[in-house]
Amino acid sequence: MSQLIPLFNSTEHLEAELKEAKESGSYPNDREYYLTIEFLLSYKGSKDTIASYRRELEKLLLWARTVIKKPIKDLGRAEIEDFIVFCKKPPDSWIGTEVAARFIEINGKQSPNPKWRPFVMKTGKVYRISDPGIRALFAVLNSYFGFLIQSEYVQVNPVALIRQKKQYLRTTQELPKIRRISNTAKEYLIAEAEKMAKENPQVHERTLFIIKAMLSMYLRISELTENDRWTPKMNDFNKDSEGRWWFYTIGKGNKEGEISVRDEMLEALKRYRIHLGLSDLPSADEDTPLITKHKNGFGGITSTRWIRKIVQDCFDRTVATLLKAGNADDANEVKRATVHWLRHTGISEDIKRGRPREHVRDDARHSSGSITDKYVDISKADRHESAKNQEI
């Protein structure tokens, strides 16, 4: 199979591309493509949502164009079912081993990245999509075809015709596993970040601060970057009248949140600010960006990919250190980890230590306690040990 070419660039590029197509009159030449861009841009207020929808619809259009060679308007229930099966077991040529940017800049122009693939499997021998992933895929497709009906491009929503969606889901006794690293791996990660900060403070004091913030305040990656909803600033750390420190954020679903700042996090903030040449703690009117671009003065970071790269560098060094120490299990765990695992790790570890669950729920900004309950981490070994000596 020839190289897979990504279809959809960043929001800014999609907006420019759509505008140019309409002005030049080329819009009707590939209506389904430009309608898909319009659909994606309707979610541009949420970086997480547009990224998720872009990822799934890119797979659909590439599959329709390169595998079955049909336009979207000709897809029926059978084709959508075939697409779901395809997503559960894509060919090796569609699977990458790392998250790669769709496009890279070459000689001042945006060019397809040869390392990009629609599916990613960081470790393991078999690609596997989770049940939540299948449900999310159905939801995206259902919304997309609803939009195409409103745009009078299709007449029927083929996703709605699939009555037995459960046939594509696995049934299991276990709750979905919360992805986290072990406490040992976490300690190695923090130690490695501290070592990096000592070796190259100009670059890695920022690394250390990001990792501690994500672990201790359960932050999502999008809550550290500038976006259309808000710009994270130093004075989002603020002290109340009782002397307690809080961190204000706008997170998933455009929801405001106020997070307890523990003493250790406050010390991490002081260390990072002193490195930047600031006072140890922010004033109420200070608008310095929270995470700075060191190479470009004190501007704030606007790309989640940049944060991922910063943390991934520390992950990679931690893996090497763990292997050198003879700890292959934890090394493999960190190798599988994504940045979001730091949030999961912080939540799980605090529950395990006995922090009141309702306090964890509020700081994690969960909509209900049932979501927080999923982080109760009872291992199979502990479960077996508690049962081993029980009488029948």
Image: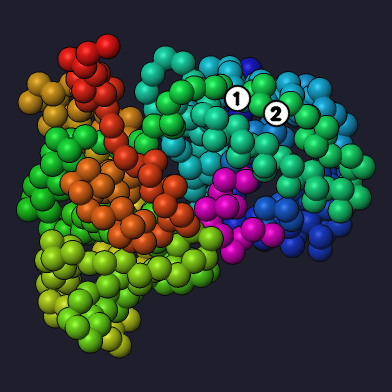
Task: Inspect the image, locate mark 1, and give the three-letter code of the amino acid beneath it.
Answer: Leu
Q: Which mark is residue 165?
A: 2
Looking at the picture, tell me which residue is in the foreground, 36 or 369: 369
State the colouring used for the structure image.
rainbow
Residue 261 sits in quarter = bottom left
How far apart, in angstroms, are the residues tagged by discs 1 and 2? Answer: 8 Å
Query: How far across and down, in percent of the image, does residue 176 sit?
Result: 44, 32
Mark 2 secondary-structure assignment: helix
Q: Which mark is residue 169?
A: 1
Query: How far across and down, in percent of the image, does residue 161 sit?
Result: 83, 32
Question: Label 1: few (<14), some or many (≥20) within 10 Å?
Answer: some
Provide the residue span drawn in magenta: 42-54
Q: Which mark is residue 353?
A: none
Residue at 53 percent across and 44 percent down: it is 103
The residue positioned farthest toward the top in the image shown: 392
Mark 1 secondary-structure assignment: loop
Question: In this image, 334 relative to 79: left or right?
Answer: left
The residue positioned farthest toward the front in the image shown: 392
Question: Label 2: few (<14), some or many (≥20) within 10 Å?
Answer: some
Q: Please report contact status of discs 1 and 2: CB closer than 8 Å, yes or no.
A: yes
Looking at the picture, tell me which residue is in the foreground, 370 or 197: 370
Task: Inspect the image, locate mark 2, and give the three-letter code of the amino acid beneath it.
Answer: Lys
Residue 21 sits in quarter = bottom right
Q: Where, quadrant-wise, is the C terminus in this rendering?
A: top left
Looking at the picture, tell me which residue is in the foreground, 343 or 274: 343
